[in-house]
């Protein structure tokens, strides 16, 4: 009798293990969806690359449409792509991106009107205050104006702060002074009156930079310019930053009367050169096999850590859903992630919820499980 019971238990256990291993494989077939699970809390967004905007792969296309209800352009709205020469604007892809978002009834985010990185070369050559002011006016009027009433939110200024909370050195700061931010928000408001306007940056969850961001955001508000929200980029890793700092920042930014968003979420699982934190796209390190340990897939032990980290993050997001309007992942699947090439080129990172074959990972189940 005892032996019989034991046998039955092992059969049940074995069955359970088989089922739990298959959960990952089958979970999308049962119609599960991040956007539906979090529908009452906040938008669940993703960043789209050119292939995705062109709908080149029907599997990815289907994944985007079923899992996400907000989209950000990963690169095509950056100055070097959309405004490569003084009088040249490239709108083919951006028109497609906006049409894609509309067709799928998604919240559409424009990224970004003003940023010191990925600027067109002609802008870097500008020497006078007047010319730069004219560039900025033309750039914002033309781009934000074209998508007036079509884009739901603009990252008006990206990354204007240093890690210690002071203003980052850039051509805009050098020639136009600190008020370039206020000017940018005023121009965007005029060109796209019904669009939400955001300031977006990395590391602003960390105390020093957070303090700088609060000063900056208050200054923009006090100038009379409209600002609706702040984007904490969220390029994080398995070990940091602490969720406590993230939570404190969500509360602090919300107290300013701003919507809070996590705009570029990913969690790197790879070794970090020089304990670097943040997402300065201009920082790069040499290739080194030791820094690329998971080329053949992510070991289960690390899958579990990744799932735990995302669970901890999403628990905080759910707790503060009244303050948060959107959580956007920086990419659809691990293969697309910029973290395969930054801050070291040619690595195999695994920072998102879907793997290179568009299959949901353990972390997907865990993030979804928080809503069950
Ligand atoms: C990244 C893109 O994902 C990469 O494809 C590109 O090569 C560099 O920029 N902060 C931002 C994003 O605001 O625009 C950056 O996107 C990542 C860091």
Image (cartoon, rainbow, N blue to C red):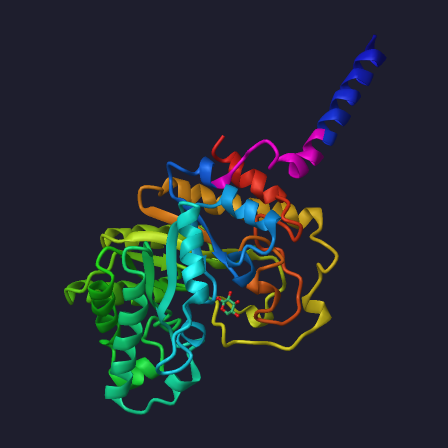
**Residue 5 lies in the magenta stretch:** no
**Does 339 sit above or below residue 282?**
above
> Left or right of 239: which side holds 161?
left
**Does 120 sit above or below residue 8?**
below
For the residue pair 60 and 242, the one nearer the viewer reads as 60
Check the image and name the residue furthest to the top.
1
**Does 159 sit above or below residue 23?**
below
For the residue pair 243 and 229, the one nearer the viewer reads as 229
Q: Residue at x 52, y 76 (%)?
A: 283
Q: Residue at x 22, y 73 (%)?
A: 183
Check the image and name the residue furthest to the bottom.
127
Position in image of residue 303 (x %, y %): 64, 47
Position in image of residue 60 (x %, y %): 58, 50
> Left or right of 52: which side holds 155?
left
For the residue pair 249 and 106, the one nearer the viewer reads as 106
Position in image of residue 175 (x %, y %): 28, 86
In the picture, residue 316 is in which quadrant?
top left
Position in image of residue 330 (x %, y %): 50, 57
> Left or right of 44: which side holds 56?
right
- Figure label count: 0
Residue 330 can be seen, yes or no: no
In the picture, residue 210 is in which quadrant?
bottom left
Q: Which residues are magenta?
A: 19-34
Residue 197 can be seen, yes or no: yes
Quarter holding the N terminus is top right
**Residue 30 lies in the magenta stretch:** yes
């Amino acid at each position: 009798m005892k032996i019989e019971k034991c046998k039955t238990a092992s059969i049940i256990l074995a069955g359970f293990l088989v089922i739990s291993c298959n959960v990952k494989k089958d979970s999308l077939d049962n119609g599960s969806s991040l956007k539906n699970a979090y529908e009452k809390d906040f938008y669940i967004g993703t960043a789209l690359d050119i292939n995705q905007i062109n709908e080149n792969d029907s599997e990815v296309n289907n994944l985007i449409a079923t899992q996400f209800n907000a989209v950000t352009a990963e690169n095509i709205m950056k100055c070097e792509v959309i405004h490569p020469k003084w009088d040249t604007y490239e709108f083919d892809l951006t028109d497609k991106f906006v049409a894609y978002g509309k067709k799928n009834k998604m919240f559409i985010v424009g990224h970004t009107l003003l940023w010191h990185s990925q600027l067109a070369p002609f802008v870097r050559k500008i020497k006078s205050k007047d010319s730069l002011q004219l560039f900025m006016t033309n750039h914002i009027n033309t781009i934000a104006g074209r998508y007036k009433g079509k884009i739901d939110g603009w990252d008006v200024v990206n990354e204007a702060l240093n890690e210690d909370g002071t203003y980052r050195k850039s051509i805009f700061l050098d020639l136009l002074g600190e008020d370039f931010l206020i000017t940018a928000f005023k121009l965007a408001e005029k060109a796209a009156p019904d669009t939400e306007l955001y300031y977006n940056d990395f590391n602003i969850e960390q105390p020093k930079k957070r303090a700088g961001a609060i000063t900056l955001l208050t200054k923009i508000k006090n100038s009379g310019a409209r600002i609706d929200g702040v984007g904490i980029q969220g390029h994080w890793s398995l070990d940091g930053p602490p969720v406590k700092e993230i939570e404190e920042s969500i509360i602090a930014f919300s107290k300013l009367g701003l919507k809070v968003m996590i705009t570029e979420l990913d969690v790197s699982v790879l070794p970090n050169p020089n304990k670097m934190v943040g997402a300065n796209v201009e920082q790069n390190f040499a290739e080194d096999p030791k820094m690329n340990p998971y080329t053949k897939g992510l070991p289960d032990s690390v899958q579990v850590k990744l799932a735990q980290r995302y669970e901890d993050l999403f628990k905080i997001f759910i707790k503060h859903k009244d303050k948060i309007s959107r959580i956007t992942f920086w990419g659809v699947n691990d293969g697309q992630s910029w973290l395969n090439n930054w801050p070291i080129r040619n690595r195999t990172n695994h920072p998102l919820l879907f793997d290179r074959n568009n299959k949901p990972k353990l972390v997907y189940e865990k993030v979804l499980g928080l809503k069950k």
